Amino acid sequence: MRINFLNNDEDNLSVFEKRKIVQLAWVNFAALCTAFIYFIYKLVFSFGQVCLPCDLSMIFLLMLALYCLSNKRINCALNIVFLIPFFVYGYYLSDFYNHIPKNETVFNTLWWVAGGLVYLAVFSVNITRLYLFFAVAVVTLWFHIKEAGLIQEYFYESQLRFQNPILIILLLFISIAGIRYYFEKGLMQVSKTLKKTTDKIQELINTSKQPIVQIKIISDEEGQITDLIIKKVNVSFEQHFKILNNKVVNQKASYIFNYLFHNSINSNDLLIINPKPQRDVFIEHLEKWYTINTIRPNDDEYICIFYDVTQQYKVISGLKDSRQRFKVLLEAIPDIFFIIDKDGVYEDFVIKDGDKLKINDSEIVGHSIYEVGFSELMANKIYQCIQDTIMNDSIESIEYALDTPNGTFMFEMRLAKLNSHSVISIARDITKRKTAEFQLEEAKNRAEAANSLKSAFLANLSHEIRTPMNAIMGSAEILAEADLPEEDRGEYSSAILNSGLQLMKMIDDTINLSKIETKTVEVEKSFIRINPLIRELFSMYEPIVKMKTEVEFEALTDIKSPAFGFVTDRVLLHESLSKLIDNAIKFTESGIVTFGYNMVSASAIEFFVEDTGKGIPADEMDKIYGRFYKIDKSNTLKNSGTGLGLAIAKEFVSLLGGKLKGESTLGEGSRFYFTLQFDKGEGFMKVVH
């Protein structure tokens, strides 16, 4: 809670006086609380020690002091201290109640009058009041000593230096007076200095050719600024802003500023909210720029000096326009210009892409070519070109790479003779050109590699097609024989069917590859049951595996629920697993081929195909996903195929949102797997035994 000890007329007080009133009020308030609490205590616990006239008078006078302070009557509050003798009499000498014997309360009186002396020494500006109270204190002590019959005792020669209350109060008064004299002397010197400063400020205001306004600060008891009042404006201000001093004096600064500057300057923002020693403002209706210097010579005043800087702003604006034109001109030239002396030291430079290259003047000018980031070999080459250019008046050209915080850039530097001791270096950014050249070279290499692979693929495909075509044609000729036994006719029909399926698979691989390369594979996701898909794949490949008598075939399902499934593309998932199973069966001569899935978490499912085949060499693991690639190129008859199975499976898995991975040990087997998100899954319940 905030207590306001000042009334509405506080504007006439200085900040110092306001603070003194607040301090006095708190001291008196503390004394009032203490007196009241002590009075209540005596009423409850020591009623016989209650001096009703004294205690009630004490409380009343302290309240009166607070009332005086609330009305800015400092002297009224201070003068109440002169009533201390009456309280001394009431508490220690009167017959109002049974008090302690008079001879035992002399030093109580001493503490009362000593407190009054300190109180006046701290808060009273008038030294005469202090002298007068000292006289009252001496009389009060003398009277108490006399009433107690202690005159002879206290004024023995042996007692003069130690226990004499009058001597003690005299020493206290001398000490207080000395301290007051010391501080008042210093204060007087400060006041003189302040007066000289104030006089100089007033002289400056009166004679200055710059518009100046003095603003009075109105503060609350806590020193917070509550208002700003115009105190004075000088003649220059009157002439400059066409307003007379008597029209603005004692007016609120906010009102005058809004009236004169049409809201271009907010006095509260300028002086209270965001005060700055100097601020540039543009007054729109005057079409002028001003620099406002703000000074606060004391706690009660601001001085604002207005400098018309319109002409300077026009010059700066013109320079900015010129600079902008030259900047646009230079930016039209995609080069960096350097001036380098014959010793290889940079004298100047102009750069278009400084922000991109992060080059500052301090990092270039004055530094040698050996200090700005070139390798020693490159710096030596540039130095030699500088010497050749100056000596032969020739144009030298160098290409180099430059590492910057934004990456590596390629430049072509051309050096031409500027004079007998320096050259001009023009550096052109050729990063895009070089990048394009590198990209073209890489594209050419990739195209040649792709062409080579496709040639190999076509050669391999033509070779692979001959085998089933020969089987179809041979079987068809035999079937045409009229005397062919019926049991042989079924065998040759089956051979034709199998060869046709093999041809169809080759055609499907070629079509899938074409779709992948042209990015026309369509992903159509829907909810599918996983276990039926696994059974379908098992049924498809079980007859093929049975033809290999030493190979077992197994399907593993982690979740047994018939409702188990999730949202994905069934065709792409089926095709991906088919390619992996086909590869596993093709390269496994004995052992087991296993495929299926595992729930690796509540939101992810892993599909896998593993075998105990011959495995893949470690140095070829990164190559097996390449198109048309075959590990064993010599054994094409035994393991025929297009070499597209893993490449197609990898692309399809990627379209499903997964990544195909493989692990293999040569001679022991391989495992291929991929993980998909269990999107909108159902039937996920795993029984653990």
Image (cartoon, rainbow, N blue to C red):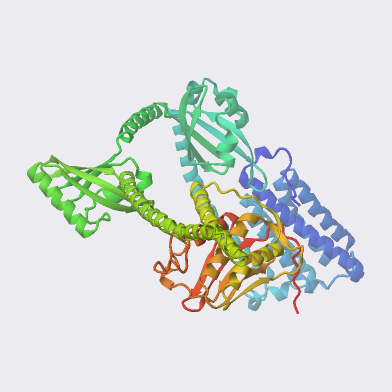
The answer to which quarter of the image holds residue 598 is bottom right
Q: In this rendering, would 433 be left or right of 266? A: left
Q: Residue furthest left?
A: 392
| Along the line of sight, the residue nearer the viewer: 144 or 82 | 82
| Along the line of sight, the residue nearer the viewer: 361 or 256 | 361
Residue 115 position, x and y percent, is 70, 62
Above or below, 49 against 519 in this view is below
Tell how many labels.
0
Quadrant that contains the C terminus: bottom right
Q: Residue furthest front?
A: 483
| Along the line of sight, the residue nearer the viewer: 686 or 160 | 686
The answer to which quarter of the image holds residue 501 is bottom right
Q: In this rendering, would 191 be left or right of 679? A: left
Residue 177 position, x and y percent, is 59, 59
The answer to which quarter of the image holds residue 257 is top right
Residue 317 position, x and y percent, is 39, 29
Q: In this rendering, would 210 be left or right of 416? A: right
At horizontal 59% and vertical 41% (from top left) the residue drawn is: 273
Q: Is residue 178 visible?
A: no
Above or below, 589 against 654 in this view is below
Above or below, 687 against 650 in this view is below
Above or below, 355 against 92 in this view is above
Q: Is residue 609 visible?
A: yes
Residue 356 position, x and y percent, is 37, 46
| Along the line of sight, the residue nearer the viewer: 608 or 464 | 464
